[in-house]
Amino acid sequence: MDTAVIGNSPVKQISPSELLPLEENNSAAVPVGSGTYGDCILKKFTRFGITILEKKVPTSDLTAVMNEAQCMNTLTHPAIPHLLGVQIDGKPYSLVMQFLGVGMESVTVHKLLHQDMAKHLLLSTNEWISVLHDISEALFHVHQKGFLHCDVKSNNVLVSGKKGYLIDFGKACLIARPAARKYTSFYNHIASEVLRGRPVSMSSDVFSLGVIIYSVGKALPHACLNSLGKQCKDTKPASRPSIPEVVRILEGNLQ
């Protein structure tokens, strides 16, 4: 595998010829998700003979692709999917990463909360708390490495093998260079101060995490998760708990 370098971090480069449809006689890709920042499809990575997730970036912005790839390379963590490399020989460019799912399906927290799921996919209260603990630790790791995720939401948390995984670093930025924009629409998972045009922060990531925690607490129902979610969603950033505090509270509720 060659490496591509933008900035200081080398990223493994993968040829389009190594990414094939899952079935030999089927030229169609198997989609598992889509969004503003790209479509995710399943492919076979012939070099290792494994099923992978290819995230195609429709803008074909090389810098954006490499920035996300370098961010993921830096954020090696058990609750963050492993990046295998990038495909930048043909457009649209794409990121190639570990596939975490059930069969051919990616299961997100959003799906578990809002769609009818098979019984074997449903989580117990303790398993839900464990998933929240996983992604809280992942987010703490992101912050320790000097990044903000900036898009923590239920669609960006995978659940596989009863474990939670934080995904989609397309909006991530450095804590030292926080992004800011004025929103014209309301988004439930974005902190109110960020919607008003203030820069993103560790506290705004906590707010977004709190939206997920509160949603799970409401669905169970679970009084402690409801309370913790509300604390994280406080309109005053300074009143929100730190990620280590969130982790400690979740650990205290694990049985």
Image (spheres, helix red, strand yellow):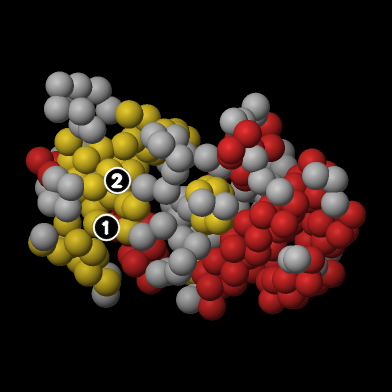
What's the CA distance linking mark 1 and mark 2? 9 Å
Indicate which label's residue lies in the foreground, 1 or 2. 2
Q: Is residue 133 visible?
A: yes
Q: Which residue appears at 31% of the width and 37% of the height?
A: 42
| Nearer to the camera, 253 or 95 | 253
Name the residue: 66% across, 46% down. Answer: 123
First in residue order: circle 1 vs circle 2: 2
Q: Report the residue marked by disc 2.
A: 52
Q: Amino acid at mark 2?
A: Ile
* Residue 14 sits above or below residue 122 on the image: below
Q: Amino acid at mark 1?
A: Leu
Left or right, 102 with respect to 214, comes to left
Percent position of residue 58, x then y: 33, 36
For residue 247, side relative to residue 158 (left or right): right
Structural crowding at the residue carrying mark 1, measured as other residues with C-alpha within 10 Å and reported as few (<14), some (14–19) or many (≥20): many
SS at badge 1: strand
Does the CB distance between marks 1 and 2 fall below 8 Å? yes
Horizontal and vertical percent position of residue 236: 83, 63
Q: Which mark is residue 11?
A: none
The residue to which callout 1 is attached is 84
| Residue 75 sits in quarter | bottom left
Residue at image point 24% right, 57% down: 85
